[in-house]
Image (cartoon, coloured by chain):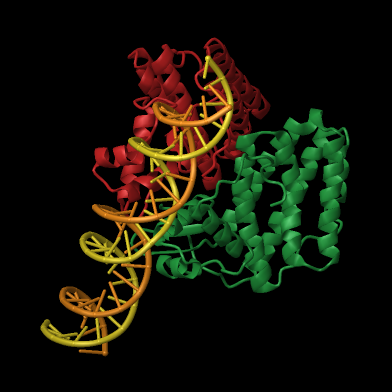
Chain colours: A green, B red, C yellow, D orange
Amino acid sequence: MAVSDLLDPVPKSTLRAHVAERLRTAILAGDIPPGAPLVETVLSQRFDVSRGPLREALRQLIEEGLVVTVPYTGTHVASLSVEDVQEIYSLRTALETFAFEQVWPRRDDRFRTDLRRRNDALLATIDAGDDRASISTELEFHGLVYEASGHRLLQRAWHGLRGRLQLYWAAHHRAHGMRGPKRDSHDSYIAAALGDDLAAMRREIADHMRRGVETTERFLRSLPSISGKKRGDIT
Amino acid sequence: MAVSDLLDPVPKSTLRAHVAERLRTAILAGDIPPGAPLVETVLSQRFDVSRGPLREALRQLIEEGLVVTVPYTGTHVASLSVEDVQEIYSLRTALETFAFEQVWPRRDDRFRTDLRRRNDALLATIDAGDDRASISTELEFHGLVYEASGHRLLQRAWHGLRGRLQLYWAAHHRAHGMRGPKRDSHDSYIAAALGDDLAAMRREIADHMRRGVETTERFLRSLPSISGKKRGDIT
DNA sequence: CCATCGTCGATTGTTGACAATCCTGCCCCG
DNA sequence: CGGGGCAGGATTGTCAACAATCGACGATGG
């Protein structure tokens, strides 16, 4: 939240934007777990807005993959299958590699200090034992390279992946006590990111993602199953 | 349209979906050129629906990057800058490369025949001199690898890129008589796609995209300018 | 003549009521 | 006792009216 966009003329807020923000925060924090129903009338009363803006906020969250709906039937928080998480990580590998290729020749001092700074922030939340915050700072850390790329479409794609990832992490952290990121998980990653060997960086990214998906599989496969299959969004 | 999703229980249509479909088609066909205003009341009368569903359809098109809106002020068809098109092509290079990596070991007979079939369809529209249709069949051709990947998130990303690309192509074809794809543009591409050298395929993709962005730059830079800067979507 | 401020038309934002659809559980019939 | 169909409640889909905001035009004063 401290990063995102840097200098909009003025936020020029609408109700829909506020509602979407609040809902997204609630979902990503795990306050509304995957599979939970999102009834428009209930939410509209709760937020004290009409159903119009609320519906539009829901549409946006649907586009972000955080919510699924089936016409005339119901809306609920998305729940990710193992395949979903695998897809997230595999695509993220491609995107993050691409991001580093874009940034590679343009890594200035600002980038280097920002990278260290965000890692420090991550370490701080880890040391504080705040798993929920660690999830956010971890993603902020990785978000740097996307922002530094200056590639708006790429940032957009990352935004979509990050939301899904955060949904998955937050939900499983909450529901099954899954631990947040480890303290040394980025040591070699940072070293490669600041070094001169792009191929090494590629390997580092692939490794990082492989670890992520392995943790995921262990976790999801060890559970009875949270909610069966889920088909694509219907809108 | 003949491909997309394979076996949904039933399309279960809503007004919003129909309106979005119609509007998207109109925009991508170039019937509503970039920069043209999209007034909700006018469109709702025209489609004979209320503003509710129409607004939600617009939100969807906004997410797809085909439309931009500024709160309380107005909505209009997006117009792409040179930087936008460069971003589309650079990201597409990364995605299409990733898609081929996914598909590479699993290229069965069906994939090979489909590839040839879609190329034949492309050649047919080119020979018929139908530039507008050529744009669609060209994108259908490239869409195969994304579909064959079975990677839903990747398909989603491709969908977003394809829409923007089609918007750009259609608009400039209509406005400035830009020619559609050339007849032999895919010869080496197909050869590599059916061959055994993945590195060659990577080069082929990069080449194809480079040609695309070069054509684009020649075109856009030779024009006075269609519409100045454009800021990010505001929602 | 120019700058500033107020007013006005246009456009989107928001609301509450009404209609269409779906799922659930019950009842009736075989 | 089992299965098909039929209400009933719940939920989303749709609509038309009202409010908030914006950009531009013109009046007004210097």
Q: Position of residue D24 (x, y in %)?
A: 44, 28
Q: Position of residue A166 (x, y in %)?
A: 65, 58
The answer to whether B176 is drawn above or below residue A156 in the figure is above
- Residue sitting at 43 percent across and 68 percent down? A39
Q: Hey, which quadrant is residue A111 in on the image? A: top right
Q: Position of residue D1 (x, y in %)?
A: 26, 90
Q: Hey, which quadrant is residue B48 in on the image? A: top left
Count of numbered circles in the view: 0
Look at the image and tell me whether residue B169 can be seen: yes
- Residue sitting at 77 percent across and 49 percent down? A141
- Residue sitting at 75 percent across and 36 percent down? A100
The one of B169 and A59 positioned closer to us in this rendering: A59
Of all residues, the one furthest to the top in this rendering is: B222
- Residue A135 appears left or right of A54: right
Q: Hey, which quadrant is residue D2 in on the image? A: bottom left
The one of D4 and B92 positioned closer to us in this rendering: B92
The answer to whether A5 is drawn above or below residue A38 in the figure is above
Q: Position of residue A57 (x, y in %)?
A: 48, 55
Look at the image and tell me whether residue B141 can be seen: no
- Residue sitting at 32 percent across and 51 percent down? B11
The one of B41 and B161 positioned closer to us in this rendering: B41
